[in-house]
Image: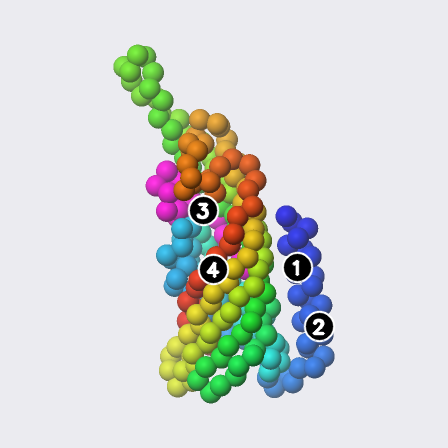
C-alpha cells in the first residue's frame, strides 16, 4: 500500500504545480482548524485540519490526527496516527456558503495492547496473556465538503465533509491467542488483509 500512497501524493503534487501556474498569488491562503468529530470515531483522535487555497477554485486539504484510544475495550494503550490529504475543487462560492468536490487518500496506523484470559489447572486459576495488535488502513475515494463562512467570528468557517471510498485494512497480532473470535460485526478486526468500504463524516472548525 505504500506505493499507492506515494503515487497519490505524486499526482497531487503535479496538480498543485499546474494550479500554481494559474494561481493569483494574492489568493493563496492557509487555514488551520480542529476536527472535533474525530473524537467520536471508532478509533478516536485529536485531529487538526489544514487547508491551502492555491487559486479561486482549487485547494489542498490535510487532516492529521493523533490516535489515543479505541472503541474496543480490549484494545488498551492504543497509540497511533492518521493522515488524509485531499484535493478539492470548488463548485460553489457564495458569501456565506462554499461547496467543494474532493478526492482523498487516507492512511491510519495504530498499535494496541490486547489481553486474553486462559483457564488452567482444571479451572483452578486464570492466566492472563498480553499481546500486541498492529493495524494499518489505507485507501481513497471521493466526497463533498460544505463550508459555512463566518468572517466576523472567532470561528471563521465550519466545514461539514462526507466522503466514501474503498480501502484495505491489515491486522497483525503478536500471538494467535489474543486474536478476536470470528464475528460478523468484527470482520475488520480479523488477522490478515481485508478490503473494506471507507465512510468519512467529519466536522471541522477553522480559526484562521
The reply to whether discs 3 and 4 touch (Cβ–Cβ < 8 Å) is: no
Residue 64, placed above or below residue 102: above
Dot 1 crowding, Cα within 10 Å, few <14, some 14–19, many 20+: some
- Badge 4 is on which residue? 200
Which quarter of the picture shows residue 101?
A: bottom right
Residue at mark 1: 8
Of the numbered discs 2 and 1, the one sitting upstream in the chain is 1
Q: Of the numbered discs in the image, which one, if any, rests on residue 79?
A: 3
Between the C-alphas of marks 2 and 3, the distance is 35 Å
Which mark lies nearer to you, 1 or 3? 1
- Cα separation, mark 4 vs mark 2, equals 28 Å
Instruction: Give percent across and percent down for residue 123.
Output: 29, 16
Q: Earlier in the sequence, mark 4 or mark 2?
A: 2
Pointer 1 or 3: first along the chain: 1
Q: Secondary structure at mark 2?
A: helix
Sequence order check, earlier mark of 4 and 1: 1
Residues tagged 4 and 2 counted as in contact (Cβ below 8 A): no
For label 3, count other residues whose C-alpha is less than 10 Å away and answer few (under 14), some (14-19) or many (20+). some
Q: Which residues are magenta?
A: 68-85
Q: Which mark is residue 192?
A: none
Q: Position of residue 163 (x, y in %)?
A: 50, 63
Specify which label sits upstream in the sequence, 2 or 3.
Answer: 2
In this rendering, the label closer to the viewer, 2 or 1: 1
Residue beneath disc 2:
17
Marks 1 and 3 sit apart, C-alpha to C-alpha, by: 25 Å
Q: Secondary structure at mark 3?
A: strand
Whether tag 2 and tag 1 are in contact, CB under 8 A, the answer is no
* Total numbered labels placed on residues in the image: 4
The answer to whether 141 is drawn above or below residue 190 in the figure is below
Quarter residue 140 falls in: bottom right
Amino acid at each position: 500500500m505504500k506505493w499507492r500512497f506515494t503515487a497519490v501524493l505524486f499526482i497531487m503534487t503535479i496538480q498543485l504545480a499546474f494550479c500554481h501556474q494559474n494561481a493569483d498569488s494574492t489568493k493563496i491562503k492557509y487555514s488551520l482548524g480542529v476536527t472535533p468529530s474525530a473524537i467520536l470515531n471508532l478509533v478516536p483522535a485529536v485531529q487538526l485540519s489544514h487547508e491551502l487555497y492555491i487559486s479561486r477554485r482549487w485547494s489542498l486539504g490535510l487532516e492529521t490526527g493523533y490516535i489515543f484510544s479505541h472503541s474496543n475495550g480490549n484494545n488498551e494503550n492504543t497509540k497511533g496516527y492518521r493522515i488524509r490529504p485531499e484535493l478539492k475543487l470548488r463548485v460553489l462560492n457564495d458569501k456565506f456558503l462554499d461547496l467543494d468536490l474532493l478526492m482523498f487518500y487516507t492512511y491510519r496506523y495504530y498499535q494496541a495492547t490486547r489481553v486474553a484470559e486462559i483457564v488452567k489447572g482444571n479451572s483452578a486459576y486464570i492466566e492472563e496473556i498480553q499481546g500486541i495488535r498492529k493495524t494499518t488502513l489505507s485507501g481513497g475515494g471521493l466526497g463533498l465538503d460544505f463550508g459555512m463562512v463566518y468572517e466576523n467570528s472567532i470561528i471563521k468557517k465550519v466545514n461539514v465533509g462526507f466522503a466514501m471510498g474503498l480501502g484495505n485494512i491489515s491486522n497483525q497480532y503478536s500471538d494467535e491467542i489474543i486474536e478476536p473470535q470470528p464475528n460478523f460485526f468484527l470482520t475488520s478486526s480479523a488477522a490478515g488483509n481485508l478490503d473494506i468500504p471507507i465512510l468519512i463524516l467529519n466536522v471541522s472548525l477553522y480559526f484562521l
